[in-house]
Image: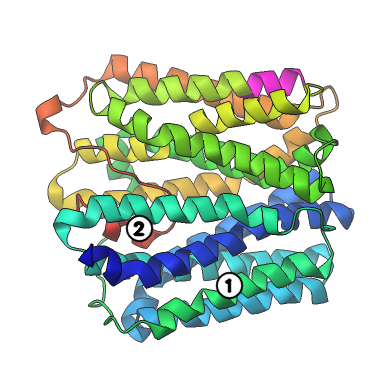
Amino acid sequence: MADYRNVWALIAAAAFLQLGGGILGVVTPLGLETLGVSPALIGAIAAGHAVGFMAGAYTASNAVILFGNIRVFSAAAAVCAASVLCMQLALDPIGWTVIRIVQGAAFAWMFSAIESWLGATVSAKSRGSVSGFYHLIAKIALVLGPFFVAGLAPIDFRPYLWGGIFLCLSLLPVCLTRRGEPPAPSSEPFPLSRLFELAPAAVIAVFVAGIVNSGTMALLPIYAGVALPDVPGGATGAAAMAAAAAWTGGLITQWPAGRISDVIDRRIVIAFMAGLAGSAALVLGLFPGLETRYILLALGVWGAGSLSFYGIGVAHAIDRAETGQISRIMSGLLFVWALGSVIGPPLSGLAFRLPFTQGGLFLLAAIMSGVLSFSMLWRRAARQDVPKEAQEPWKITLPSTAEAVEIDPRT
């Protein structure tokens, strides 16, 4: 319990961040659609957010070394909160593109400051349970955030006020904590070519996760506004329900899928989860006129498969690594995921408006999931798995920032 008391402020700050992030993830694409922006351009703007995130993750370690965790977090939270309010002052696609890039970098700085601090504070024996609790609270907040703006117009000023409020509130637990800051972090490079030689299946899995999950979730609010017209709360209410269904599915299956991967070849588990996601996406793509309850169920199944295998891919790479390489491998895989997140939203935006179907968004997700499932089975046939006695146990690992490696107990 002492470890939880030591980091409650950090977990509370992350929850406020995810509440604000969940709101932005819904109102941004819907607001752009209201401004007359095409789905392809909405996807490109979402890719700009991922580019900002990559830049923020790349510079976060040096920023923490120079200024410390509290100052980095506070500065980034202030910039992010101000940028959310600026979205109401610059109601045009160009302005929002710049703002989303800034927000991506700011979120990376904030989570880097929190997660490196959390990892240095928690004792080794409790790191696994605290990490799981941290991710659980953060993802629950991400699910709940959109419901604060359900029923409001996408460019109404109130959703952006809510987002700014939560980002400002995230400052309180961090600035008022009496816990000391951790020592400055250190990092070493790990070339991507070497990472691919070590664990090609892991690289493929996290790259596809970045493409499919980031692209689909970026366009999901627009899809929900069309596919779920009878959900109370209008477009924002439909988007909140759709996002909640997908994230809830991922939260439910993440733990059992990870534990099963400790028993059988992780690549088989990833192939199965990708196949599950691909099947649900195929249903959504081929039958866009389903009843609301069936669409939400299919979204939950898709999330159960697609939003749960990132950590298994990371664990597969760690199985093949030496102990001293783990933190660098996790940072490298995060970079691969972020690269996929840059590519995914524009592709999903183009697929959303395919001329011959109304379900192009999920048809693309189905194709990519099928490719991933086949790739995992092919890699298993080409290379034997690591003996079970040499494997590290799976732990909850989610793609947040490059500093997330610090809270993994295997480091």
Given the current orientation, which residue lies at the most extreme left position? 389
Residue 105: assigned label: none
Disc 1 from disc 2: Cα separation:
20 Å
What's the amino acid at mark 2? Answer: Ala
Query: Closer to the camera: disc 1 or disc 2?
Result: 1
**Residue lying at 35% horizontally and 64% vertically, measured from the top left:** 115
Q: Where, quadrant-wise, is the N terminus in this rendering?
A: bottom left
Can residue 14 be seen here? The reply is: yes
Q: Where, quadrant-wise, is the C terminus in this rendering?
A: bottom left
Q: Across the whole image, how many numbered discs are drawn on residues?
A: 2
What's the amino acid at mark 1? Answer: Leu
Q: Is residue 231 magenta?
A: no
Residue 404: assigned label: 2
First to last magenta residue range: 281-287
Specify whether 31 is left or right of 107: right
Task: Give percent across and percent down for residue 219.
Answer: 71, 43
Lower position in the chain sequence, tag 1 or tag 2: 1
Task: Give percent across and percent down for residue 10.
Answer: 38, 69
In this rendered view, identify the residue nearer to me: 290 or 88.
Answer: 290
The answer to which image quadrant residue 188 occupies is bottom left
The answer to which image quadrant residue 68 occupies is bottom left
- Mark 2 element type: helix
Specify whether 223 is left or right of 169: right
In this rendered view, identify the residue nearer to me: 347 or 152.
Answer: 152
Residue 167: assigned label: 1
